[in-house]
Image (tube, grey):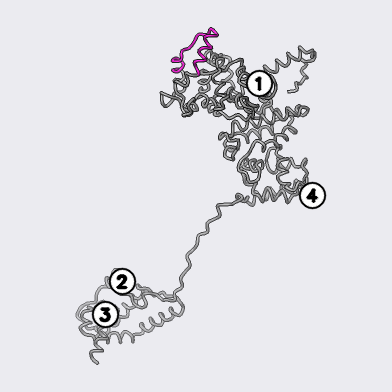
Amino acid sequence: MEMEIVGDVASLDPDLLQLPEFSPLALKSNPFLAEQLFSLWLSLPETGRLVKNLLADVKMGTSSFNSTGSSMSINVSTNNLSASMFSTASTPPLSPRSTSGSPRVFKQRPGPFSLGSPLKIVREPVREVIPQFYFKNGRPPPNELKEQCLFATDKHFYGHLGLQIHEFKTATKDICKLPSFFSTTLFRKIDINNSGIVTRDQFVNYWIGGNMLTMDLATQIYTILKQPDCRYLTQDDFRSILHELLASHPGLEFLQSTPEFQERYAETVIYRIFYYINRSETGLLTLRELKRGNLIAAMQHVDEEEDINKVLRYFSYEHFYVIYCKFWELDTDHDFLVDKENLIRYGNHALTYRIVERIFSQVPRKFKSKVEGKMGYEDFVYFILSEEDKSSEPGLEYWFKCIDLDGNGVLTPNEMQFFYEEQLHRMECMTQEPVLFEDVLCQIFDMIGPQNESYITLRDLKGCKLSGNVFNILFNLNKFIAFESRDPFLIRQERENPTLTEWDRFAHREYIRLSMEEDVEDASNGSGDIWDESFEAPF
């Protein structure tokens, strides 16, 4: 029996009593003393209050009892107990200790209360709400912008069950902020049932519900023009807006009596758009290409400008007139096709046979013509734009492919000499002072300044403003001689209008020349009133 008691008492951990004044070894050597101390501690009022507080915390499911607080409470009780039992001790009391710095606190083993209550409520972690950043049909418009659009829509549709196609132009321009010649195309895009009328709800559902309101202008135009489920624009997608432009623009009214030339004008505008913007040369215009080009700005310009010839990009009638007349001059049999013998006469026989042969080998561009060995009108448009503006990006790429005989992406001296040999022979035939190829090659390399002195890359050409003259030296004798002489009048013209391209200057000169020739022809046919200022030519 005694052994059992000794075993039970000895099993008590002296550290649990939190007695700072007594050594644990002293208590273990006298187990009855430890039992007496524990009994006295339980009888203290502070201990009873402590137990009651702990029970109350357990019932409430919370616990303010931590290891630090337990240590402090027990220390207070045991200090009182030791003071009452050993008040006559000869040693002075120890200085008060900080529980956070006491080595006993770090040594203590976790008691039943230091672990916390098993009924403690576990708080849910706070979840951060991430706002939606992807919208399948585009980001919805802000409420303020939506309200403004609805107000303008109600104003336009007030008193109408819906708008007919001839009434829809104001809504296109004022609400949608699109060029007015998009009204017919937009109307048919909304009126999917071909009812001939667009109601307010249909318009709101398409323009606001379809999130067209939040798109940029280029994306809006791209979405309106393209066919459903397509991710590109074709040439046919532009025909509807050009037909409306021809029908409504004051600068094109005179063409309404000649429908065949209306169609040619629309074709020419489309070919010019794809020549400059469709840099992938696939015939499929992407949204990225549309945004990178200047077509949107040109559309806005032509919608505001009454003089169509002031819109030099794409829509100028004078530019169309020059292109069409130059093609008509070469197409002697008027079958709307041009062969090698026809093209060699271009620019008063300015081109060499070798470069014409390369063009008809379709290296720079595959012909759209269905007839073997002949180029059609679209092919000619690409040719003349490249020939008269060689410094433009499409022009540089066009002629670079012609000179690059092996297709390795570089122009070597041997390839350039192959084309210049014919130029040299022509100069000798015309009693011009011949310029040796070695001198020409040095001039070309000094002009371009290529990264590698043994060849020229397309990147080298695009980095030089005079790169177009390289091709004139190699295969256009007339322009080569003009470049060597450098007419002061042309230099002054370029300085006065630095924004004009080589094509703009050429088209302006040719239009004046063609107009004068037509005036002379009309005069020779007996038109006595040809010099009347009120006379207006059919073109």
Image position of 466 (left or right of 337): left
Q: In the image, which is nearer the foreground, mark 1 or mark 2?
A: 1
Q: Give the x, y percent position of residue 382.
A: 60, 27
Residue 91: quarter of image: bottom left
Residue type at mark 3 is: Pro
Label at residue 326:
1
Q: In the image, which is nearer the foreground, mark 4 or mark 2?
A: 4
Please report whichever mark, 1 or 4, sits nearer to the chain's N-terminal start. 4
Mark 2 falls on what kind of element?
Answer: loop
Please report whichever mark, 3 or 2, sits nearer to the chain's N-terminal start. 3
Image position of 69 (left or right of 478): left
What secondary structure is the magenta-colored segment mainly?
helix
Residue type at mark 2 is: Thr
Q: Give the x, y percent position of residue 362.
A: 57, 27
Mark 1 falls on what kind of element?
Answer: helix
Image position of 51 (left or right of 270): left
Q: CA distance from mark 4 to mark 3?
A: 95 Å
Q: Residue at coordinates 74% horizontally, 30% vertically from top-left? A: 250
Q: Residue at label 4?
A: 161
Q: In the image, which is nearer the foreground, mark 1 or mark 3?
A: 1
Q: Residue at label 3?
A: 14
Please report whichever mark, 1 or 3, sits nearer to the chain's N-terminal start. 3
Q: CA distance from mark 1 to mark 2?
A: 103 Å
Residue 182: quarter of image: top right
Please report whichever mark, 4 or 2, sits nearer to the chain's N-terminal start. 2
- Circle 3 Cα neighbour tier, 10 Å, few/some/many (<14 / 14–19 / ≥20): some
Q: Is residue 426 magenta?
A: yes
In the image, is residue 204 above or below residue 108?
A: above
Residue type at mark 4 is: Leu
Q: Residue at label 2?
A: 99
Mark 3 falls on what kind of element?
Answer: helix
